[in-house]
Image: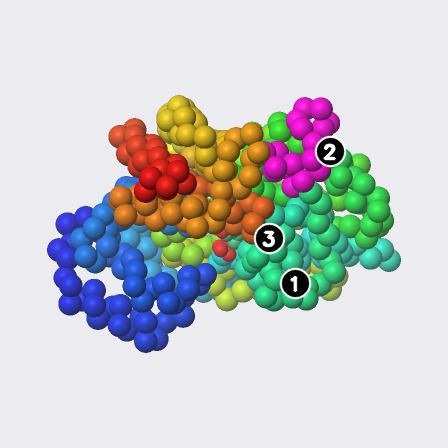
Amino acid sequence: MSLTNSPDPEVRARVVKQDLDSVLHPLVQHRALETSQLVITGGQGSTIVDADGTTYLDAMAGLWCVNIGYGRVELAQVAAEQMQQVAYYPHTAMNLPAAQLGEQINSLMGGDYHTYFVNSGSEANEAGFKIARQFVKHEYPGEFRFKTISRYYAYHGTTLSTLAAGGMGDRKGKFEPYSGAFVHVPAPTCYRCPMGLEYPSCGVACAKAIETTILGEGPQTVAEVLVEPIMSGVGVAVPPDEYHPMVEAICRKYDVLLHVDEVINGFGRTGKMFGHQHYNISPDIMAVAKGIVSAYLPIAATVVKNSVFQSFLGEVADERQVMQVNTYGGHPVAAAVAVRNIEIMLEEKLPERAAEMGGYLMAGLKDRLMRHGICGEVRGKGLLIGIELVTDRESKTQLGSALVQGVVNFCRSNGVIVGRSGGGARHSNTIVLSPPLVITRSECDTLIEVLDRALQMTVDKMAGRG
Ligand SMILES: Cc1ncc(COP(=O)(O)O)c(C=O)c1O
């Protein structure tokens, strides 16, 4: 789709009416939609266009997912060809694109993995929990290992179990109670250390807390530890370099599986193909989604190390096979598009580009935004960046919610879409950026400039000048 769609006010008005009359939207308050709507009709590269003709630089790549950028017509051709060949057959059988995609992922992971296909990041983590539980049932008969240890302020999905594993009170509160199988530990949110410590004198106490928790719960009750390498939703929490190797060593010491959530971090976002590769750790279970197909179609996956996969082998009568199925898993059309998406990523060296462009963007943001006293910290890796806003740098008090939202709104009215962290009063004061990996230098400059003006506008407002 090109950006030359001619605006049609009548069509736009009809869509808005149909939608407001009949559609239930996620997360947004419908009252707000009555006065302000985005009706997206096109996209190219890092730019999206509304039905009224307004263009926006999408510094969130949709929902952290359109990694190769908008408007790759080639992917529509791949989908059409595959749909004509064979649109669907259940994945209890084999199909060519899903086999190719499995091989691609295995090769990106170094050749020691098998992949189970699902449709969303939530399902990928959910299947991960189930694979972990089935694995420990096979491997530790007579024991009752079932718990997942995860971090407060994490986000792992929207189903009941992934919400239970997550640690964002504001996202979970309305659906309580949850199963007691999920135990939380402090997160490595170093700018606001939950333990009141400072790196490096803390000795990475948040990683050590995982061992204390395993011992407290009883190692014979714990199936796995779940981590997102760089926590995205809470405002891009980059852990100290030692954190993940320490977590992995604890998992190995107690024979607990390491489940890594690469739903956002994966597929180039952080400047390497997978986020965990910055830390030289080796997941037993890995959830991928979003960038696997750059959101051109829904497909996601749970990738398991062969040492876990082995446990699912046996005679048919042993009933060790993966005891779950989903209708669309391994969908040939989505898989074919994902295969081409990953090829494009490799051909265009997009992970390397994310590292380079992320470095450029981060340097520019630090230079321009840290001049404002309300910019507490600019942090991130590759093209996953958080800008934490505070009343002043010394107290680190979180900037008020309305002012943070004012920054998001200012950016949007100046043609740039940025995101905002979740995590309730403690953590929702960070502007988050996760642009397509194809963002250009001049688009980075625009982003920096608009954010600079947004922060200046906020400072002026706080001083009663705006
Ligand atoms: C880290 C992480 N894991 C899992 C999910 C869930 O993915 P989905 O929305 O595709 O179910 C998300 C969604 O944003 C996420 O950020």
Instruction: Check disc 2: other Cα within 10 Å, few if <14, some if 14-19, many if 20+.
Output: some
Q: What residue type is labelled 1?
A: Met
Q: Position of residue 71 (x, y in %)?
A: 26, 47
Q: Is residue 109 visible?
A: no
Q: Name the residue under label 2.
A: 205
Q: Is residue 150 magenta?
A: no
From mark 1 to mark 3, how far is it between C-alphas? 30 Å
Please identify the quarter of the rendering in which residue 464 is found. top left
Give the structural element (helix, strand or loop) at label 2: helix
Q: Is residue 350 above or below residue 410?
A: above
Would residue 236 appear left or right of 462 to someone viewing this image?
A: right
Examine the structure image and report whether residue 191 is included in the region drawn in magenta.
yes
- Please tell me whether mark 1 sits on a helix, a strand or a loop: loop
Name the residue carrying label 1: 323
Q: Give the range drawn in magenta.
A: 187-207
Q: Nearer the viewer, mark 1 or mark 3?
A: 3
Which of the pair 23/260 is nearer the observer?
A: 23
The amino acid marked with disc number 3 is: Met
Question: Is ligand 1 less than 8 Å from the beta carbon at label 2?
Answer: no
Question: What is the tally of numbered marks visible in this picture?
Answer: 3
Any mark on residue 168, and which? 3
